[in-house]
Image (spheres, rainbow, N blue to C red):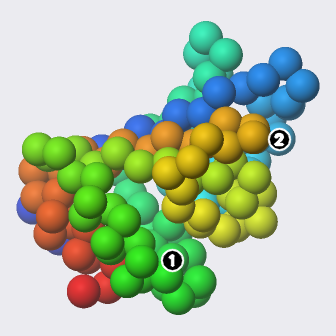
Amino acid sequence: MYPEHIYIKVEIRTPIYPTEDPDKIKKCLSKVFPEAFFEVKDKNLIGESHSLETFTDIIEEMRIRDTARSYLEDRIKGEKCRFTISKQATCNRKVNLSDEDQPLGGVHVTIESDQIERFIRMITGT
């Protein structure tokens, strides 16, 4: 999907609370980030990927590409883009971009790329 000369690394991180089942949270996150490898570390579920193909498909299906582009571009610092989505929404294969604290803790995503602005434009269809 991405040109070979664009490097990306994606880190997905969310807290796991005592009332939550890590396997269920992993299953939910895998609906949005199926390309990621997840592991539990220090009460967090952490994933790593080199693709956002499903995330891209979802924002297109939800018809939020323009909103996603503005949201993501506002969060670029250097070669990284950091943002938060709702953990609960991922269970329904949805992307809910958020600035607010989430009741179940947000899913913190960091995209690192040597061409971050171009990559954001690519995944948001512009």
Left-right relation of 53 to 119: right
Q: At x 53% / y 88%, what residue is drawn?
A: 63
Point out residue 10 in the picture as x, y percentages from the top left corner: 37, 45
Task: Report, in whole angstroms, how far the alpha carbon at label 2 lies from the one at label 1.
Answer: 23 Å
Above-or-below relation of 67 to 93: below
State the count of labels: 2
Report the quarter where the C terminus lies: bottom left
| Nearer the observer, 97 or 125 | 97
Report the quarter where the N terminus lies: bottom left
Residue 32 visible in the current orientation: yes
Left-right relation of 16 to 61: right
Point out residue 74 in the picture as x, y percentages from the top left corner: 26, 60
Residue extending furthest toward the right = 19
Above-or-below relation of 42 to 73: above
Local secondary structure at mark 2: helix
Point out residue 54 in the picture as x, y percentages from the top left corner: 52, 68
Q: Answer with the quarter of the image where residue 95 lies.
A: bottom right
Point out residue 86 in the picture as x, y percentages from the top left corner: 64, 53
Q: At x 25% / y 64%, what residue is drawn?
A: 73
Residue 123 visible in the current orientation: no
| Nearer the observer, 51 or 126 | 126
The disc at residue 24 is 2
Local secondary structure at mark 1: helix
Give amino acid for label 1.
Ile
Residue extending furthest toward the top = 42
Mark 1 lies on residue = 59
Give amino acid for label 2.
Lys
